[in-house]
């Protein structure tokens, strides 16, 4: 019945199945929305944050999704600016994922601040020395860019596209896309960086503090770099998951391999830089502030040296090697494993840079403080995931996200009956069945 | 076809609309208004301004009576600060007064006179007028007196000196009851000691500022002992003068932590240590020959007694203080220029055995540090000199001739003036006569007396209980009639600063703010009751109002009081040794006029049989918790450590060694049992306590007041009961046998 | 900053706290709460959510019974000057300029109506001197009567902290200006905690002014960010170059070390 909206030449599951999927994810979404309103109306006492954990789960989720969303600006940069044209086959999806990540980030921030109705003071009374100010500006600007990059995709919907004005608009937008992509890359460079700076400038927190290059601490560059390296991995991972769920091949291997290779080399160089940074910090920076590694990794129930290994080796070196060695990369399973390890690695890095910073006592007579999120925090953090899945379901169903889909999944010359028949066949591949793993 | 047009127009409308609105100032205006709204939420109080004034007064909140300056804005009192030119606190305060306005304002005040209508303690009250309230009281007292039993009325006061306690005592005397009693305190012990060693009916003062070596037998010198804020200032003075402070107690209290040396001691054996130190001083002839030979009697008896059984070796075994420490303490003490030995555990609410006061004081005597700079002085007690003698009619004389309920001054305890701790048992026994009425003033015995449960039960038997509490405390809760007094800062009052202060000092408290509730000054209540009862009572309390009797009592110093807010006898000097000791021998009496020194100094065992209990429970006074008649205001409780309260659960201190032996880890839930009862607690492993002990603070476990105080922790007095000192009748309890079992 | 002994502006108000005298009585905490309309809840036993601009820490030498020692350490906001004057850990990160470094007094302010509760400043402060209003403040019926009109009551969702009783500075300056003076006497501007402390353990004044006690006690060296010259004096976390204006004095070496040598103590302390 919604067939009029579905792109030409591709097959989609029946509407009831789609609706069922939406319903299930929608339920999770509503749970998150409920928690969100609790936080807004009752205040942040709904969370397990406290005066030691002013930053907690949400800020971590923010940093994480923004890093993972990095696929958008970097792929854009590669395609439109550097001219890796083959990436056109995945850029749409990269943009969509980026859009989801960044809109989520903004939503989370709106819940995280104690006085959301005043949050625009950050622009009005901006303190140019604050990394958070930089983040706020670049983040909002880049979100606009992403919207602009995402709009044409919406306009390409079969029906919307029939409106001449929109059709022309889309066409024109495509022409200028390179400029937007460049702008996006530029903005991203700064907000990814300043997000790194958020922790790096805390000279009161020896665990987070890093030496500066010009006005920026090392974490500034490390964050941008890691976003460029790990973001694409997330794009690839989500693409893979989508393919599993829809049971279709959506992007050609050439494209996947290209992006994977580039991400691999970015990751490889990044992890070398990260290792150098860690060594310098451990041997020079921290000691100069009166601290030793043991102060950061002992005397507490959770944060041990293992976390360093996990982040740098398991989440960095290993996936990097898999991705840069063609023989390994070309193995579907290893490729997926690498992207998973990478995603875990970057999330772990952001976790450490937020929550371990809060956990470590600075005054000699202070104490380690552990934290676990309240259900309201968890729900509001799951909210964006559900929202993302829904946006992907809708976009995938009604928009030509994967240019190669039709070509990779040719339809048999069909009669109305056949359509129905196909529809039945696709039942067991319906979204609801497999969406769960994507959620987790 | 038509559908297409719809979609087009719809899109146009949508986009157009959005762009349109965005261009109007509307969304921005709304944004701004919302932000402004969040900056002045209607439910966030906005304190009104007004004229700034500062009013000097003294605080009757505790007996320390510090000079304070109250900042007022319009009619509101907004801050209590220390009065820099006041002799004791000199601008400083303790946390209780700093939080004092939370007592003046707030919901736990008794709002108006009330009479009980429900079961006792059911907290069902009926508001009555002051006329009705006073006539009810007068009627009851009148009937009892008509029946010729005035002695069956008892008045229990939390305060000992000043116009109010004196007025109450005067009322009772003229009424015909010997039963005016003050809440127990170390003052009782010191007073009795003075009588028996100095032959003086007076009070002690300590020339603290000049002392250069302080030997404290468990006194919470900076935790509410004596005049709290003053003592803390003195402690700083000691630091500046490099005075030496030795703190002897089983727990690393604040006082011990700030002392030059903490000497842990087995609780209850302090008297032995004092005698052990005396042993060394005598044995090594380190004592003051002039004083001992020329101004003291009974030294030989003492000498042979002490040398017979209190060698450092023996004492070390029983006290847990090693021999060399005992010897060192003795030599240091004796060789210091101005040594001073102090006692009275913690804040001194539980007096302890008389033997302790005598043993500690004889150290001061041995070094001749009596009525000397830096020493212990005997001072005259504060009195309302301006008042004429009360008139006693026949009934009054008959009543006053009766023995006191608590036995003080009787054959068993001739030296005692009052033994409030013995009241509950006397009431329960109904001997020597049943108590018909109890008047409670500025005291909360149901909460603050050891064996609180027994106290409550005893009081339940009293047919008529009247409370004058300003706040709905535990005692007021079981009263039949509550005639709320003005709170501090609402009432005229005087504080005779004693608590060890070594000069006569009286502070004048004035009504800084108008009464916030429908209250009446308790002084006026009694004047009106007396007038109603007429006869010699009316004649003895003939003042028009309390202000008049206050002024007449202080007539000699009223000018000073009005001008400075206090009167201080700066030139006061204690009697010289030749005239200081009106004992039979005319000399200081080392035997405390007691033939049986062994009995006098016998350590008091703790209640409970060792078999089923393997630990000793001790209670301590925390400077962060008010533990007298005043309940801790919210600010005080806020400063209580998370190692003491976790939610409403009390954490008890246990030495790690002891805890591990019993298999307890930090924070484990446990049941704390004593012969009196048990309570659920959590265990806090603390090295700040001797092994084998459990320590809990006093002043928690209120059932009265509101959620900011009630039900937090447990009341130490529910688990620890009184233990009578055979020698004096004083409450000698220092703890109780206990056990901790996994819960 | 190399300016010393300047009688004119600017000032550098600061504190010297004598830990030998501090008894841990907590009066400073209460006086502060009373002066500054600090809210309180029915349960304040969770010290991670308990607003105490002034907090008295309880330091231990970490030794077992009976060699254990305790020292009480009152901790207001340290009013950090930062590596270079004004670059306080918290001020430098606040995105909305809701906390600021006053170049005239050296006082770090907090603008409640501008703060929007992002809590970045709390993450930046190594002294945990900043507190978030997790709840709307509620005063039991009638208690709102004692609120100080010179300090606005805060609302839920924002950060607050010690401001060296800035309102008292303002009042004193008003008074002085009415009398045609530009300068304050040492006694004219004193903080609530300083006044209330019964031990006289807290001294407050202008660190620049050689006639002020704080200057004489701490002997700050402003060529070295205000490092104390007095060997008995120290500042918390000296190495971080937060350059606090709160100095501590102790005759005990383990206490002085605890002030800034993290590895010398086992990480444990309970507020008392
Ligand atoms: N035997 C003896 N008596 C003494 C002394 C002594 O040494 N020995 N010392 C005097 C000294 S130093 C002191 S501190 C006092 C100690 O006496 P406590 O009973 O320990 O407490 P106070 O501070 O005196 O109580 C003063 C009165 O203020 C009123 N009040 C004000 N606020 C409140 C409140 O919130 N709740 C309640 N229930 N009442 C409130 C009550 O009527 C209370 O009884 O005793 C004085 N009397
Ligand atoms: N921070 C803080 N301060 C407090 C409190 C608190 O909880 N926290 N509590 C307040 C309360 S309720 C109390 S009860 C007090 C405790 O302290 P206070 O009650 O004020 O002191 P007391 O123990 O009553 O008296 C101290 C000693 O002075 C000597 N003394 C005083 N008067 C006489 C006298 O007439 N004769 C003789 N011979 N000696 C005398 C005796 O040694 C007496 O025991 O602290 C008050 N201050
Ligand atoms: S000692 Fe404390 S409570 Fe008592 S009067 Fe002085 S300041 Fe007030
Ligand atoms: S008031 Fe003074 S003595 Fe009491 S804790 Fe504060 S600083 Fe220490
Ligand atoms: S102590 Fe904390 S809040 Fe105060 S100035 Fe320093 S960093 Fe800022
Ligand atoms: S919480 Fe308030 S003061 Fe702190 S950084 Fe955010 S806006 Fe600034
Ligand atoms: S200076 Fe003022 S605001 Fe700061 S702690 Fe002391 S009293 Fe509180
Ligand atoms: Mo007392």
Image: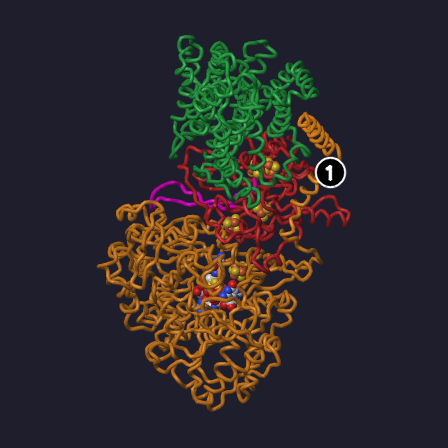
Chain colours: A green, B orange, C red
Query: In the rendered view, would you say A230 is above or below A125?
Result: above
On-image quarter of the N terminus of chain B: top right
Q: Residue B480 at x, y = what percent?
A: 47, 75
Residue pointed to by mark 1: B26
Query: In the rendered view, would you say C10 is above or below A330?
Result: below
Q: Would residue B713 be counted in the magenta stretch?
A: no
State which chain disc 1 sits on.
B
Q: Nearer the viewer, residue B712 or C66?
A: B712
Q: Would residue C72 be counted in the magenta stretch?
A: yes
Query: In the rendered view, would you say B9 is above or below B51?
Result: above
Left or right of B479? Residue B55 is: right
Q: Which residue lies furthest to the bottom in this view?
A: B394
Query: Pointer 1: residues within 10 angstroms few (<14), some, or many (20+)?
Result: few
Q: Residue A158 at x, y = what percent?
A: 61, 21
> Magenta part of the protein: which range?
C55-77
> Can the viewer see residue C12?
no
Q: Which residue is drawn at 57% across and 21% down?
A: A399
Q: How many numbered badges does the structure rendering display? A: 1
Q: Residue A8 at x, y = what percent?
A: 56, 17
Q: Which of A59 and B382 is in front in this view?
A: A59
> Can the viewer see residue B214?
yes
Label 1: element kind: helix
Query: In the rendered view, would you say B720 is above or below B432?
Result: above
Q: Which residue lies furthest to the left in this view?
A: B611
Q: Residue at x 55, y 74 (%)?
A: B127
């Amino acid at each position: 019945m919604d067939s009029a909206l579905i792109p030409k030449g591709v097959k989609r599951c029946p509407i009831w199945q789609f609706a069922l999927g939406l319903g299930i994810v929608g339920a999770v979404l509503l749970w998150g929305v409920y928690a969100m309103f609790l936080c807004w109306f009752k205040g942040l006492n709904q969370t397990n944050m406290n005066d030691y954990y002013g930053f907690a789960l949400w800020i971590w989720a923010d940093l994480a999704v923004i890093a993972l969303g990095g696929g958008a600006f970097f792929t854009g940069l590669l395609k439109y600016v550097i001219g890796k044209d083959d990436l056109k086959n995945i850029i749409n999806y990269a943009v969509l994922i980026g859009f989801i990540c960044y809109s989520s980030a903004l939503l989370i921030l709106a819940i995280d601040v104690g006085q959301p109705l005043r949050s625009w003071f950050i622009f009005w009374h901006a303190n140019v020395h604050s990394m958070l100010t930089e983040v706020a500006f670049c983040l909002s600007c880049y979100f606009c860019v992403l919207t602009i990059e995402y709009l044409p995709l919406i306009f390409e919907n079969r029906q919307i596209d029939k409106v001449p004005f929109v059709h022309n608009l889309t066409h024109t937008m495509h022409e200028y896309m390179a400029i937007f992509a460049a702008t996006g890359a530029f903005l991203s460079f700064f907000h990814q960086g300043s997000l790194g700076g958020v922790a790096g400038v805390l000279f009161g927190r020896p665990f987070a503090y890093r030496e500066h290059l010009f006005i920026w601490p090392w974490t500034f560059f490390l964050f941008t770099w890691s976003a460029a390296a790990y973001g694409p991995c997330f794009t690839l991972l989500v693409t893979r998951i989508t393919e599993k769920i829809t049971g279709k091949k959506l992007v050609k291997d050439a494209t996947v391999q290209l992006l994977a290779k580039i991400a691999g080399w970015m990751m490889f160089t990044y992890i070398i830089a990260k290792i150098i940074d860690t060594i310098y910090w451990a041997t020079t920076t921290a000691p100069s502030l009166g601290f030793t590694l043991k102060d950061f990794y002992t005397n507490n129930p959770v944060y041990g040296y293992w976390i360093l290994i996990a982040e740098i080796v398991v989440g960095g070196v290993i996936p990097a090697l898999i991705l840069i060695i063609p023989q390994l990369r070309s193995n579907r399973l290893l490729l997926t494993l690498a992207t998973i390890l990478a995603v875990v690695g970057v999330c772990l890095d952001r976790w450490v840079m937020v929550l371990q910073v809060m956990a470590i006592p600075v005054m000699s007579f202070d104490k380690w403080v552990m934290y676990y999120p309240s259900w309201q925090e968890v729900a509001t953090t799951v909210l964006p995931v559900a929202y993302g899945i829904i946006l992907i379901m809708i976009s995938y169903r009604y928009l030509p996200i994967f240019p190669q889909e039709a070509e990779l999944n040719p339809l048999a010359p069909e009669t109305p009956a056949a359509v129905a028949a196909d529809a039945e066949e696709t039942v067991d591949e319906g979204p609801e069945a497999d969406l769960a793993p994507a959620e987790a | 076809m038509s559908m297409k047009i719809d979609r087009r127009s719809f899109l146009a409308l949508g986009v157009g609309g959005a762009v349109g609105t965005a261009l109007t100032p509307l969304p921005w205006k709304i944004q701004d208004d919302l932000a402004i709204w969040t900056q002045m939420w209607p439910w966030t109080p906005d304190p009104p301004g007004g004229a700034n004034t500062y009013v000097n007064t003294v605080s009757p909140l505790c007996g320390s009576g510090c000079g304070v300056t109250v900042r007022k804005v319009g009619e509101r009192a907004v801050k209590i600060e220390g009065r820099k030119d006041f002799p004791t606190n000199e601008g400083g305060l303790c946390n209780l007064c700093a939080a004092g306005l939370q007592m003046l304002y707030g919901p736990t005040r008794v709002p108006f006179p009330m009479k009980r209508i429900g079961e006792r303690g059911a907290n069902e009250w009926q508001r009555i007028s002051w006329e009705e309230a006073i006539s009810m009281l007068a009627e009851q007292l009148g009937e009892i007196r008509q029946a010729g039993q005035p002695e069956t009325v008892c008045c229990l006061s939390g305060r000992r000196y000043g116009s109010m306690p004196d007025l109450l005592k005067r009322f009772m005397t003229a009424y015909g009851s010997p039963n005016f009693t003050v809440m127990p305190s170390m003052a009782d012990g010191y007073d009795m000691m003075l009588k028996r060693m100095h032959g003086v009916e007076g009070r002690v003062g300590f020339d603290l500022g000049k002392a250069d070596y302080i030997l404290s037998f468990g006194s919470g010198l900076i935790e509410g002992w004596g005049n709290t804020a003053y003592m803390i200032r003195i402690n700083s003075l000691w630091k500046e003068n490099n005075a030496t402070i030795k703190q002897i107690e089983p727990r690393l209290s604040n006082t011990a932590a700030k002392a030059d040396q903490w000497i842990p001691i087995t609780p209850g054996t302090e008297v032995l240590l004092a005698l052990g130190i005396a042993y060394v001083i005598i044995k090594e002839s380190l004592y003051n020959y002039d004083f001992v030979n020329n101004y003291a009697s009974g030294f030989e008896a003492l000498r042979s007694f002490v040398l017979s059984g209190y060698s450092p070796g023996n004492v070390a075994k029983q006290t847990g203080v090693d021999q060399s420490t005992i010897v060192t303490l003795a030599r240091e003490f004796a060789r210091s220029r101005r040594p001073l030995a102090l006692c009275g555990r913690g804040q001194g609410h539980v007096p302890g055995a008389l033997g302790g006061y005598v043993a500690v004081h004889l150290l001061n005597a041995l070094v001749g540090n009596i009525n000397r700079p830096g020493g212990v002085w005997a001072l005259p007690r504060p009195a309302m000199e301006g008042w004429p003698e009360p008139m006693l009619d026949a009934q009054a004389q008959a009543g006053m001739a009766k023995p006191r309920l608590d036995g003080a001054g009787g054959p068993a305890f001739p030296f005692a003036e009052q033994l409030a701790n013995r009241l509950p048992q006397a009431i329960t026994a109904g001997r020597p006569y049943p108590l018909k009425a109890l008047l409670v003033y500025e005291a909360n015995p149901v909460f603050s007396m050891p064996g609180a449960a027994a106290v409550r039960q005893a009081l339940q038997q009293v047919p008529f209980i009247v409370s004058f509490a300003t706040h709905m405390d535990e005692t007021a809760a079981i009263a039949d009639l509550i005639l709320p007094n003005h709170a501090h800062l609402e009432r005229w009052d005087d504080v005779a600063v004693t608590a060890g202060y070594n000069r006569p000092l009286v502070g004048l408290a004035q009504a800084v703010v108008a009464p916030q509730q429908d209250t009446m000054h308790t002084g006026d209540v009694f004047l009106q009751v007396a007038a109603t009862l007429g006869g010699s009572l009316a004649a003895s309390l003939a003042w028009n109002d309390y202000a008049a009797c206050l002024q007449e009592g202080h007539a000699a110093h009223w000018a000073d009081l009005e001008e400075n807010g206090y009167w201080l006898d700066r030139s006061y000097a204690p009697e010289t040794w030749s005239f200081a000791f009106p004992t039979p021998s005319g000399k200081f009496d080392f035997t405390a006029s007691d033939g049986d020194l062994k009995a006098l100094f016998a350590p008091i065992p703790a209640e409970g049989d060792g078999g089923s209990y393997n630990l000793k429970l001790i209670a301590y006074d925390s400077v962060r918790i008010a533990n007298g008649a005043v309940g801790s205001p919210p600010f005080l409780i806020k400063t209580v450590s998370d190692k003491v309260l976790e939610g409403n659960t009390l954490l008890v201190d246990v030495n790690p060694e002891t805890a591990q032996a019993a298999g307890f880890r930090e924070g484990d839930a446990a049941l704390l049992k004593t012969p009196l009862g048990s309570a659920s607690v959590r265990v806090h492993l603390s090295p700040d306590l001797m092994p084998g002990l459990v320590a809990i603070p006093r002043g928690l476990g209120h059932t009265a007041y509101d959620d900011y105080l009630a039900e937090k922790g447990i009341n130490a007095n529910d688990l620890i009961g009184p233990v009578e000192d055979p020698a004096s009748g004083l409450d000698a309890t220092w703890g109780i046998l206990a056990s901790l079992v996994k819960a | 900053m190399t300016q010393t002994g300047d009688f004119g502006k600017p000032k550098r108000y600061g504190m010297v706290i004598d830990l030998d005298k501090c008894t841990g009585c907590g009066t400073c905490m209460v006086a502060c709460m009373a002066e500054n309309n600090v809210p309180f809840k029915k349960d304040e036993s969770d010290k991670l959510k308990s607003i105490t601009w002034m907090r008295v820490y309880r330091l231990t030498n970490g030794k077992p019974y009976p060699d254990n020692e305790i020292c009480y350490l009152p901790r207001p906001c340290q009013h950090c000057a930062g590596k270079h004057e004004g670059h306080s850990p918290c001020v430098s990160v606040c995105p909305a300029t809701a906390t600021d470094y006053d170049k005239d007094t050296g006082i770090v302010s907090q603008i409640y109506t501008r703060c929007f509760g992002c809590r970045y400043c709390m993450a930046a402060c190594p002294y945990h001197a900043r507190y978030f209003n997790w709840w709307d403040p509620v005063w039991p019926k009638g208690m709102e009567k004692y609120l100080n009109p010179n300090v606005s009551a805060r609302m839920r969702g924002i950060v607050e902290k010690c401001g060296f009783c800035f309102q008292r500075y303002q009042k004193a300056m008003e008074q002085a200006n009415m009398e045609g003076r530009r300068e304050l006497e040492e006694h004219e501007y004193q903080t609530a905690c300083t006044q209330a402390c019964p031990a006289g353990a807290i001294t407050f004044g202008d660190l620049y002014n050689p006639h002020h006690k704080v200057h004489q006690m701490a002997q700050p060296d402003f060529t070295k960010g205000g490092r104390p010259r007095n060997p008995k004096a120290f500042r918390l976390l000296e190495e971080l170059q937060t350059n606090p204006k709160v100095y501590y004095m102790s005759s005990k070496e383990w206490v002085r070390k605890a002030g800034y040598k993290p590895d010398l103590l086992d990480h444990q302390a309970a507020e008392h």
